[in-house]
Amino acid sequence: MDIRLEAIRHAYGDTEVLQDISLAIPAGRIVCLVGPSGCGKSTLLRFIGGLERPMEGRVLQIGAPPEGCLNPLTFVFQDFALLPWRTVQGNISLVLEDHGIRGKRARAIIDDVLARTRLSDFASALPKQLSGGMKQRVAIARALAVNPAVMLMDEPLSALDSQTRELLMDDLITLWTRQPFTSVYVTHNLAEAVRLGHRIVVLSRRPGRICEVVEIEKPLAERLYADPDLDEVQRHLWEMMRDEARAAEEELIDV
Amino acid sequence: MSDTTAATERPASDGPAMEVRFRGGGFAPQSRRWVGVAVFVALVALVEWGTRAGWISPLTLPRPSDVFGTFVELWNSGLLFKHLGPSLSRLAVGAALGASAGVLLGVLIGLFSYVRAGLVPLVAAIFPIPKIALLPLFVIWFGIDEGSKYALIAFGTFTPTVVATYGAVDNVDRSLIRMGQSFGLSWLSIVRKIVLPGAMPGILSGLRISLAIAIILLVAAEMLGAEYGIGAYILQAGSLYDLERLFAGVVILSLLGVIVSAAIAQIERRVLGWRT
Ligand SMILES: Nc1ncnc2c1ncn2[C@@H]1O[C@H](COP(=O)(O)OP(=O)(O)OP(=O)(O)O)[C@@H](O)[C@H]1O
Ligand SMILES: [Mg+2]
């Protein structure tokens, strides 16, 4: 299933947030959205996931979601959004219960996704007992449980320390390599973008417009920590973003 | 000798070494159960001593040992349970009615803008009415028997429960609700599995206040048409200026309050174990 954005424009009151965004998200690839603070990345992601409606333009799903897909457009949030009163497996079964998946079938799915995120030993732990990285792995496991066609990730690693971030990036790459998923991945962090993105979309400062789309051909599994090729791309992205980011920063100070 | 060791251990900069002053304590409630008991015992002992020594006249305060005597007498004659039974049933029925109606309406106010717009001003208007003043009205509406007593207690617990409940619903983390929507959960599932558990801490702390108010209103409810009941017992003793019996009754109400509060603490421990 592909996603296509057509001429999206949006404003909150008088502030124009997004202008003329047209973008294709091909199946099986990770598209990274980068851009300065407040340029409308999260807003765009909410449009793609159907949590909000743009003032103009359309978000299109092209093709049917694959067989067995319970929730085609699935979010992974920056703040994890786990229910603190449910255990790890309870948090995952939450999203299965509404599809009538209970008992043995639910058990099988939960065991599978916990194994894939290396959380099998923590099935009955409460979120308060887990570290930030583990919480985000639970959130990823929950997203995998509904077998999504597209994963919408809003800065999923921003709340974590840099070591945990590296580890989780490796986890994501392993997950993708084993079974390619489609994803829109919002981040501030250019290193994350060049590590995980097949396609990197650079947005300008508010009102957000697409500045450039960079394709990285190198397969995810071959991208290593401090890879010189990636550094080159990252430098190029930073050159492009620096002025925008500075201007956005000053704009915020003016307010 | 002490000089030499000091010299070897002394860091690069010299001058007197001082341990860093600890200033991180406090502001973290810890359970110190015996302190409450000690304060209580000390107070009773003081009054006992005062009344025996004579610097508290028996007209100001009854002697604690006499109050205790009255209490034992109440117990032995079986009268205690004759008073306690009706009071507890009034409390249970009235508080259960008021609290459940309050939680229900509070949740509805929290969920539906129209209900909120329509009822929040109404609740604000009836909250400050002293419910005792409405007792004659309740007697006309629900009869002089149990009906009016249930109604008074129910009405008194209802308003604080409503206010606490819709506040609690408002405070449920919106990002969790967003999460529920993003996974395509039905409206009912979101309410049942996200909103209600999320509002539980606020609802329970509201219940603490509501139930205390129910106990306060018990005395008022038994002002009219009650032969037996702790409230009736206290009012009788009061009208006769029988301070020993008055205090014995008051002590029973206090104990009731302590028990209710401990029960809620127990429920909180069990239901809200997930809180950090
Ligand atoms: N519900 C809303 N109502 C009004 N303004 C909003 C709302 N949501 C976002 N905005 C504004 O829209 C702009 C874009 O917000 P958005 O959260 O999409 O930016 P972002 O690119 O995700 O920023 P960040 O990098 O800080 O996460 C911001 O200026 C924000 O203040
Ligand atoms: Mg954002």
Image (tube, helix red, strand yellow):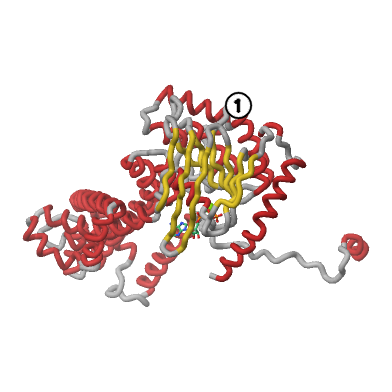
| Total numbered labels placed on residues in the image | 1
Q: In the rendered image, is residue B249 in sight?
A: no
Ligand 2 contact, mark 1 (Cβ < 8 Å): no
| Disc 1 residue type (three-letter) | Arg
Rendering coords of residue B77 (x, y %): 21, 51
Q: Nearer the viewer, residue B141 or B232?
A: B141
- Is residue B63 found left or right of B148 in the rendered image? right
**Residue at the spot 18% in from the left edge and 55% down from the top edge:** B229
Q: Is residue B39 visible?
A: yes
Instruction: Give me the residue at 48% from left, 40% from top.
Output: A4
Give B183 or A129, whichever is nearer the viewer: B183
Q: Residues within 10 Å of mark 1 (few under 14, many from 20)?
A: few
In the rendered image, the vertical position of residue A174 relative to residue B105, given as above or below: above
Q: Nearer the viewer, residue A252 or B199?
A: A252
Image location (x, y in percent) of residue A199: 61, 41
Q: Is residue B119 shown above or below B182?
A: below
Image coordinates of residue A141 in percent, x first then y, are 53, 34
Judged left or right of residue B195, residue A83 is right
The x, y position of residue B89, in whole percent, is: 20, 49
Chain under disc 1: A
Q: Quadrant of the N terminus of chain B?
A: bottom right
Corner quadrant of residue A174: top right
Q: Residue at x 49, y 28 (%)?
A: A110
> Which residue is drawn at the image coordinates 53% and 70% (left, top)?
A255
- SS at badge 1: helix
Q: Which residue is mark 1?
A: A178
